[in-house]
Image (tube, grey):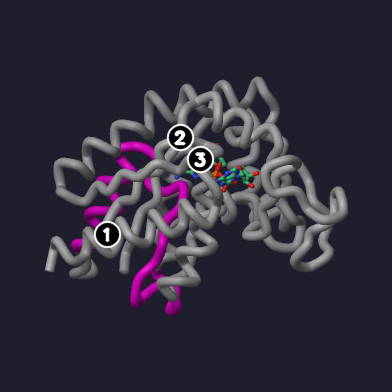
Amino acid sequence: MRIVLVGPPGAGKGTQAAFLAKNLSIPHISTGDLFRANISKGTDLGKQAKAYMDAGNLVPDEVTIGMARDRMAQPDAQGGFLLDGFPRNVSQAEALDAALASDGVKLDAVLDLEVPEDEVVKRIAGRRICRNDSAHVFHVTYSAPKTEGVCDVCGGDLYQRDDDSEETVRKRLEVYHTQTEPIIDHYRAQGLLVTISALGKVDEVTERAMEALQTDRAAQA
Ligand code: ADP
Ligand code: AMP
């Protein structure tokens, strides 16, 4: 399956993507994770992206679209993928449409995770991520690690993202409303949009998402 996950920062896209990708046997492709990996490695792409990310702005399309396309061209993504954080504006959505069309393939669904704003703010404020693997995501109260600051899965250090500060989060939410939300209508018009509530326990949301994707698939068959 080829799926796009949409939702505000802190909705739980990365958390759900880890489970959905495993259940559906497709790679989880997060442009935010790709940028952060480039920043840790000190690449030119990472250097270009960092200032935009720290300010809560989108990294320019010229950098982002090429990076996402390169990742989607990898062998493990030929049978499908779960995109998380891409596309993030209408021009990226159009570039994705064109890239898929030139490969002769289509998206199966765009899964929109709905969460009220006060909840995403709480989720982001307590988010902690493992330095070894960004798929290991915790929350200081909602899904606390057994030992503070230590990843339950691999023992790695947990850290708070630079852009999870209160001020940057406000900017990221504004960018989400003005630039990313319009892609919801773009995909609704294509009949691809599947919306679920992302409130409740992580495994309840995963179950809801799997059910919604299966129902959608059955409806299209
Ligand atoms: P996104 O990728 O959409 O920015 P994350 O998956 O990183 O969001 O989740 C943001 C924070 O919210 C993390 O700390 C995560 O542990 C927590 N979280 C994710 N899903 C839930 C949930 N269903 N209930 C409570 N907290 C959650
Ligand atoms: P995320 O990990 O998805 O929360 O993304 C973190 C930051 O990376 C965003 O605030 C942007 O600065 C940048 N970023 C991630 N994906 C994109 C994208 N598709 N387009 C532009 N910037 C992006």
User: Mark on residue 11?
Assistant: 3
Residue 2, horizontal then vertical, whole percent: 32, 64
- Determine the CA span between mark 2 and mark 3: 6 Å
User: Is disc 3's CB within 8 Å of ligand 1?
Assistant: yes
Rendered position, 183 above or below 45: above
Q: Residues within 10 Å of mark 3 (few under 14, many from 20)?
A: many
Within the magenta stretch, is there residue 156? no
Residue 111, horizontal then vertical, whole percent: 34, 50
The quadrant in which residue 150 appears is bottom right
Residue contact between numbered discs 2 and 3, judged by CB atoms under 8 Å: yes
Residue contact between numbered discs 1 and 3, judged by CB atoms under 8 Å: no
The quadrant in which residue 99 appears is bottom left
User: Mark on residue 99?
Assistant: 1
Residue type, mark 1 in image: Ala
Q: Which residue is located at x 55 percent, y 32 percent?
A: 120
Q: Which residue is located at x 45 percent, y 34 percent?
A: 115
Within the magenta stretch, is there residue 93? yes
Q: What element does badge 2 sit on?
A: loop
Residue type, mark 3 in image: Ala
Residue type, mark 2 in image: Val
* Quarter of the picture holding the C terminus: bottom left
Magenta residues (range):
73-101
Foreground of the two, 77 or 91: 77
Q: Quadrant of ligand 1?
A: top right
Rendered position, 160 above or below 156: above
